[in-house]
Image (cartoon, rainbow, N blue to C red):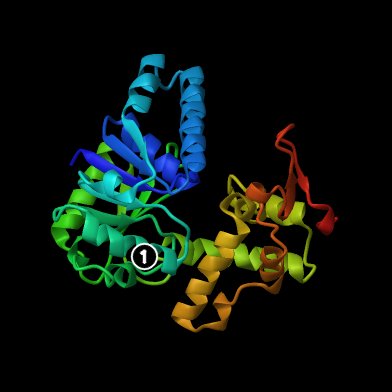
Amino acid sequence: MNQISVIGGGTMGNGIAHTFAQFGYQVSLIDVSQVALDKALQTIANNLDRQVKKGTIQAEDKMNTLACIKIFTNLEEGVSQADLVVEAASENFEIKSSIFKHLDILCPSHTILASNTSSISITKIASVTKRPQQVIGMHFMNPVPLMKLVEVINGYSTAKEVTKQIFDLSQKINKTPVEVNDYPGFVANRILMPMINEAIYALYEGVAGVAEIDTVMKLGMAHPMGPLQLADFIGLDICLSIMNVLYDGFKNPKYAPCPLLVNMVQAEKFGVKSGEGFYQYSPETKEMRVSERFL
């Protein structure tokens, strides 16, 4: 397995492409937007520069990594030789199902189709293809080049040999794969998102302020980042999407998204990517401060 296609030039997609390329795999990075692809390559180059500065890689490694990445706006061209496709598009079933329908037609018969979905059923995604045994989840963590975990999610029909290949591949790129089964939220987000949602409820109900809630979890539970800051980092729209998947999947009120989260997403306060969520972010000074809305 040497030819890897990654669909989506956003944060997760460029991070996945960066990681595979750094380990010598030939990567086709695909997005409908040339602007997004150009931005992705610049982000990868900037992140490699940081690695060089820290001494974790050499300048030659940066050049070799970038040389392994080709960009495509045409899906057919980008997947024509793929051994593995990793889809990292928006966390939306309609978008993902459309992509997988096309991949099933365009990819070679041996190609494994993986989704980086953080919550959507792999079985449901696989059902739109004629190769459900070759569909699997590869849930990378953000930032991909630094985070060790890959949640490997088996759909109902995923072949054991496919799971083994993805395990072996994950280890070759210095990740730690963990096998989980296909239930809403898998493991990571089934546990993480209700905690974030509960932190939002604590704010919503006036138990404590933004900084206070995050400080309790950082100092009391040794979390590197408080749950509200983490929600901003993930994207409040993504958090809401995952909570809705959990709520729809389990039909349990404990997974109902907090009304404050719903309102913030409707107001397009998504966190870091929009410049404001529970905190406000200044791209010029890199300053982070509690949003005026919560002072």
21 over 33 or under it: above or below:
above
84 lies left or right of 251: left
The residue pinned by badge 1 equals: 98
Q: Is residue 174 visible?
A: no
User: Horizontal and vertical percent for residue 161?
Assistant: 14, 56
Element marked by disc 1: helix
Q: Quadrant of residue 163?
A: bottom left
27 lies left or right of 279: left
Identify the residue shown where x is 74% and y is 64%.
203
User: Horizontal and vertical percent for residue 114?
Assistant: 30, 55
The image shows a total of numbered marks equal to: 1
Identify the residue shown where x is 23% and y is 40%.
3
Q: Quadrant of residue 260?
A: bottom right
User: Horizontal and vertical percent for residue 274?
Assistant: 67, 50
Q: Residue furthest top?
A: 59
Identify the residue shown where x is 42% and y is 47%.
31
Residue type pointed to by label 1: Ser
160 lies left or right of 289: left
- Quadrant occupied by the C terminus: bottom right
Q: Nearer the viewer, residue 15 or 171?
A: 15
- Quadrant occupied by the N terminus: top left
Identify the residue shown where x is 56% and y is 53%.
234
